[in-house]
Image (tube, rainbow, N blue to C red):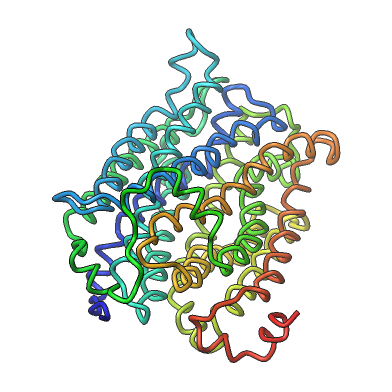
Amino acid sequence: MQKPRLSLGDIINMSLGFMGIQFGFALQNANASRILQTFGADVEHLSLFWLAAPLTGMIIQPIIGHYSDRTWTKLGRRRPFILVGAILASLALCLMPNSGYFAAVIPPMFIGAGILMIMDASINVSMEPFRALVADNLNTEQRTTGFSVQTILIGLGAVIGSWLPYVLAEWIGIPAEAPEGEIPQNLMFSFYVGAAFFILTILWTVSRTKEYSPEQLAKFYADEEPEDHSAGLGQIFKDFASMPKTMKQLGVVQFFSWFALFSMWVFSTPAVAQHIYDLPASDTSSAMYNKAGNWIGFIFGIYNLVATVMAFFLPVIAMKIGRRMTHAICLVAGGLGLVSMYFAPNPEFLIVSMVGVGIAWASILAMPYSILAGSIPPAKMGIYMGIFNFFITGPQILNGIIGGPVIKYVYGNEAIYALLVAGIFMILGAFSVMFVEDKDDPVGKNSPLLNYFQRK
């Protein structure tokens, strides 16, 4: 039995909460390194502090996926997790820039790292059920459209979140400078606004979206083997061991993609401050350093804006050349964008670099999930979406462990080289897409080029 088609309005309502999630995620990505450096973290230690985020994601998402597959309440099975995660993440957003107030007990950079862990854990509690919710509610024909709409809203939220500190400082005049060891007012206000926006958009989705009951889902998946809902957490390891072939192949693609993204998020501020603004690595509080930090937020908004626009075209392109080829081309654009940052003659050139990154980001948020969903047993959608997160958090954890020492001992504390290598990794991800099996994509399945790599 085929699921009924949803209207565009229903798809937007279902995905609007992701706009709030990405608002908070963008504030974290663009400013966490800056906040930690303000509180005393060295550039070679930044990646270690950032380990908190992928580690919590690796643990949280499969567990949330496991239990959301087995939960049914008056609010549904995905929405309770989405709501609880939103409340906790909003509180963490308010606490993050205020870490300095806990300095009497623990150094503020460690408090900041702890709050970063709580914030990312809470975002993950909301994020994983959102992926499963889209797959639950949409039929095969609408799946790519659903993930593309989600990408559009993710992009809009990220643009607002990334640009807000810059706008508050440059357009409204809220102070962007602060005494050493303190967070500027424009950044603090941005986090407060982000917390409010996060919870409001989640409440909209939770109140406007319906979920299919277990009885309805049973009819849709009448031909599928029923899931044993009495299985405990040990089932996660069994499901991991028996993951579909397509998921394993996509894991290679995700490794290269997310290793590169982690480098960009963690090291862009020190890299641009040193390489473009000619600041010493020890400068983490001057007016020029804060200007560089605000500019990073602005150009991160650019790549998210490009991703938002690109998401409109992804379904059309995928219908012409297939999902895998679409993803490969987008990753090449992102790789070239990251490589070009090394050759940037001025800060404004980085806007061009972020156009390529934005094209890749749009595809990273949509294409792997669209390819994956067709290979997953419907009754295990939540758990496999959570397990798939291993291929996102794993490369980030590896980068977090080796990234700082490599910058210190190999790159001579020049963080720009981390971005150069990130670009190369993203291009390697584009090459690895060619080997992914996507039986659910009739266009890509008939591609002579992709079939050549499949035979290899």
Q: Which residue extends farthest top?
A: 104
Residue 258 found in image quarter: bottom right
Query: Would you identify the image quadrant in which residue 172 lies?
Result: top left
All told, the count of numbered labels is 0
Look at 36% across and 71% down and name the residue there.
146
Q: Where is residue 254 in the image (x, y as percent from the top left)?
A: 61, 59
Which residue is found at the position 54% from the left and 64% from the top?
Answer: 364
260 vs 432, nearest the viewer: 432
429 or 63: which is nearer to us?
63
Image spot of residue 244 (x, y percent): 54, 66
Q: Is residue 130 above or below residue 147?
A: above
- Give how far across and how far down residue 400 sits, in percent: 66, 39
Q: Is residue 154 left or right of residue 442?
A: left
Residue beneath the point at 42% across and 46% down:
164
Q: Residue furthest left?
A: 74
Assign the C terminus to one quadrant of the image: bottom right
Residue located 56% across and 64% down the image: 247
Q: Where is residue 353 in the image (x, y as percent from the top left)?
A: 65, 62
Q: Please state which of residues 356 and 345 is positioned toward the viewer in this rendering.
A: 356
Q: In which quarter of the image is the N terminus?
A: bottom left
Q: In this view, does 306 lie to the left or right of 277?
A: left
